[in-house]
Image: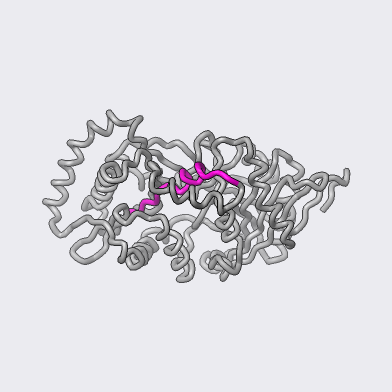
Amino acid sequence: MVDRAGQLTVRPVESRRSWNEFFDLRRLIYRDNRNVVFPLRFMERTMLDPDKHPFYLHATRQAYVAYRNRRPVGRIVAIKNDLHNEFYQDRVGFFGFFECLNDPDAAEVLFKSAGGWLREQGCESVRGPVNPSMKSEFGVQVKGNDDPPFVMMAFNPDYYEMLLLDNGFEPIREFNAYLYDVDSTYDIAKERDAELLGATDRILDRYPKLRIGSVERADIDATLREINRIGNEIRQSGWGFVPLTDEELDFMIKQLKQVLVPRMILVAYWEDKLVGYCVNVPDVNWALRRSRGRYDWMRLPQFLFWLPRTQRTRVIALGADPAYRRRGVGILLSIEMRTRGLASLNYRQWEFSWIDSQNDASIKATGRTMPLDHYKTYRLYEKTLIGS
């Protein structure tokens, strides 16, 4: 596709050189942004590699790069997720990994290219951004861009939303992120401590069959599989939910085990039945931002040095069996999480994210145990492809 001035082109990514240009674009666009986090290059490539990522066992993708005067100015990936369409019985296509200079014409040809490919695959609409699905980074950040992203959270320039709106996309869903900052809320949290300790004692006295604990390293695999099982039951009514395949679960566990701290995987049992869970992931991005150099072999040793020293953590999973939710499971998990994190790991910031704005009530129990600030918002967008 070429504009009338003959300066703007968009090409499918097929060669090794074009893939290098695809990945280098992010570093070009954010080179002056002090809040950006650049992943290790092997991490980036794995997310789009059909031979390495199990997502592509049930999905296909086509990447594009836009060039102005032969220089890369934008990129996009069109994604057809067969598992999503089978689960919802619809024909939704997706786009992701979108990055673009503030160049409306470049954004237009990228969206048209992705939309054209998705129409050829039988899709009737396009939704995004997802990288490559809602099990990883997703959404355009429309609030809180002046703060570095936590692990697995999206980050983008302020003008991205306008690029989507100008190309016919409409916002369809919002998700929020909440921050518990120990130092800025110290006085408020301290006032709650006595009340929380009393609440813990009352809950445990009332329900002696309930116990809270952490996970031994040898049990991480089995525990995460059990958490995924109960999590699927809790989340299956959630907007956009698609269950993990066995291959995706294996892949996720393998990735998480490299960074998880076992004592921050908390579980609640009613006798021998798992009824609640809380999974914290140390903020990998905090360590990545401190890792300097152009190549992975330069950054990886620095990353491994900084990771155990991070004072930020993201809660990627927090839930309770609905049948036991009113028995204080969520409150106990939140109290134990905060106590352990401060005492043994000196975490100073917790992020609770991917919270559907239409289900903010789910965060209220946690908000009773620690002061939370709604500090970031992400939006997903969609447009029809029929007749476009």
Q: Is residue 248 above or below residue 177?
A: below
Residue furthest out toward the right:
5
Q: In this view, does 17 lie to the left or right of 54?
A: right
Residue at the image position 53 percent from the left and 64 percent from the top: 88
Q: Does the magenta stretch include residue 115?
A: no
Vertical order, 190 against 80 (above or below): above
Depicted 361 relative to depicted 321: above or below? above
**For this rendering, which residue is in front, 62 or 168?**
62
| Residue 365 showing in the rendered view | no
From where the camera sits, is residue 12 visible?
yes
Look at the image and name its color scheme.
Answer: one colour
The percent position of residue 137, horizontal first and vertical second, equals 53, 51
The residues colored magenta run 278-293
Horizontally, residue 7 falls left or right of residue 247, namely right
Left or right of 346: which side holds 142?
right
Q: Picture coordinates of residue 245 (x, y %)?
A: 47, 69
Q: Specify whether 244 is left or right of 270.
A: right
**Which residue is at a point 22% across and 31% down the rendered structure image?**
191
Quarter of the rendering containing residue 361 = top left
Asked whether residue 292 is drawn in magenta, I would say: yes
Of residues 116 and 58, which is closer to you in this image?
Answer: 58
Q: How many marks?
A: 0
Q: Where is residue 55 in the image (x, y as percent from the top left)?
A: 55, 65
| Viewer-side residue, 309 vs 87 | 309
Q: Residue at x 35, y 52 (%)?
A: 318
- Looking at this view, is 94 or 352 the one in front? 352
Image quadrant holding the C terminus, namely bottom right
Give above or below for 157 relative to 238.
above
